Image: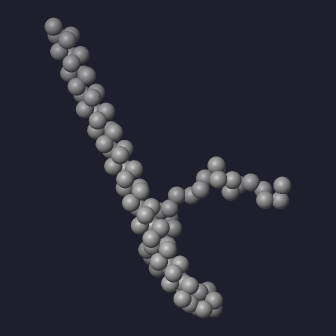
């Protein structure tokens, strides 16, 4: 009887922990998706502003802080994208 109560208690804690972990993973995935969208929008706005400038002015203009933050927030392509392959081969 005591064993049954302990097993039920441990199972309840495990189910609660698993559900909490799943919700935490889903929340984190949604936050990453939102951050990626905001960063992409910021970079698209900056690109549109740069297109309005002459080539000489583009070289002199420094990006605002939100653009630099957006560039850092976006994920890098990684190893699978082939960025490390030698283009000459």
- 45 to the left or right of 82: left
Classify residue 57 by image quadrant: bottom right
33 is higher (above) or lower (below) than 62: above
User: Does any portion of residue 42 appear in the rendered image?
Assistant: yes
Q: Residue at x 45, y 76 (%)?
A: 65
Q: Residue at x 45, y 71 (%)?
A: 41
37 is higher (above) or lower (below) than 28: below
Q: Residue at x 83, y 59 (%)?
A: 88
**Count of marks, rendered view:** 0
Q: Position of residue 25 (x, y in %)?
A: 37, 44
Q: Position of residue 37 (x, y in %)?
A: 43, 64
Q: Position of residue 79 (x, y in %)?
A: 64, 50
Residue lying furthest top in this view?
A: 1
User: Does any portion of residue 69 appear in the rendered image?
Assistant: no
- Name the quadrant of the N terminus: top left
Q: Position of residue 49 (x, y in %)?
A: 50, 84
Q: Nearer the viewer, residue 37 or 9?
A: 37
Q: Which colour style is shown?
A: one colour
- 64 to the left or right of 5: right
Residue lying furthest right in this view?
A: 89
- Name the quadrant of the C terminus: bottom right
84 is higher (above) or lower (below) than 64: above
Q: Residue at x 57, y 58 (%)?
A: 76
């Amino acid at each position: 009887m005591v064993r049954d109560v302990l097993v039920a208690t441990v199972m309840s804690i495990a189910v609660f922990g698993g559900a909490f972990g799943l919700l935490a993973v889903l929340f984190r995935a949604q936050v990453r998706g939102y951050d990626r969208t905001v960063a992409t929008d910021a970079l698209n706005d900056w690109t549109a502003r740069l297109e309005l400038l002459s080539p000489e002015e583009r070289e002199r203009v420094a990006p605002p802080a939100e653009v630099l933050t957006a560039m850092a927030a976006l994920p890098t392509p990684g190893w699978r994208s082939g960025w490390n392959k030698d283009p000459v081969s």
